[in-house]
Image (cartoon, rainbow, N blue to C red):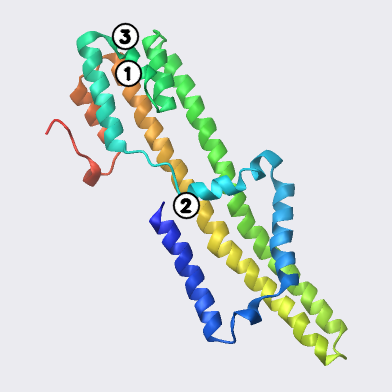
Amino acid sequence: MDLGTVIGLVLILALLFGAMAMGVGIGAYIDIPSVLIVIGGSIGALMVAFKPSQMKKFTKVFMIAIKPGEEDVLELIKKLVEFATKARKEGILALENDVNNEENEFLKKGLSMAIDGSEPDTIRDLLEIEMDQTSTRHKAHAAIFATWAGLAGAMGMIGTLIGLVAMLLNMADPSAIGPSMAVALLTTMYGAMIGNIFGAPIASVLNIRNDDETIVKQIVLEGIMSIQAGDAPRVLEAKLLAYLAPTERVSQFD
């Protein structure tokens, strides 16, 4: 679990509901018509804006923000240095068994191509295409939540207008003014809550996950290129550590 994301979401909801409870009570902030307008309307609009195949992954993508697949980058660099050391001593064909047991599919694919004797430019081009396409898909998933933030706010405003129209049409009936005003105000609140608690923050964290994964794949790509070129393990490690922040760089040769 990404504790920062989880704690942040829990903290926001706890503070908001706590403030509501200390005021007039949570019940006063529950309005079914407002829920239907904002949640139902915004999700319906998302279904229009995105492909069904993308919407099917809505929950899965949300869980990626909560529980991302973590890659130990230092361990990955260490593994690539070990591969480089072995390739320098025994030749790149000696890595075949290691590649067959490799769990990182991106590394496995690239190193397999190097072992098979593919040209460096061919390997780089194919792996960069895969990186770009993966990043494009991830950005599209993040865009769902970014769009949801905007749509929820818009639906909140639509609900406000609906409530105001109903209120103005029933000014002669004092008992109708309260429910109409509730719809008018609560839909705006629901839209703001969805957009600023779930929509925009989740989109942001998904973009960060995408950037992190892209860096990991770039490290793998450069590692494969260095192994194929026969670079010294120290040179390979220095090149790969350059992708990390200075405080994160730990050399196994020190």
Q: Residue at x 70, y 55 (%)?
A: 43
The residue that disc 2 covers is 66
Task: Name the N-terminal-most of marks 1 and 3.
Answer: 3
Q: Amino acid at mark 3?
A: Leu
Q: Quadrant of residue 254?
A: top left
Q: Which mark is residue 22?
A: none
The residue that disc 1 covers is 98
Q: Is residue 51 visible?
A: no
Q: Amino acid at mark 2?
A: Ile
Q: Residue at x 36, y 38 (%)?
A: 71
Please indicate whether residue 155 sits to the left or right of residue 247 in the image. Answer: right
As measured in the structure, the alpha-carbon distance from the residue carrying label 3 to the one carrying label 2 is 40 Å
Q: Amino acid at mark 1?
A: Asp
Contact (CB < 8 A) between labels 1 and 3? no
x%, y% of residue 219?
34, 31
x%, y% of residue 113?
42, 14
Please indicate whether residue 33 sits to the left or right of residue 225 in the image. Answer: right
Q: Which mark is residue 93?
A: 3
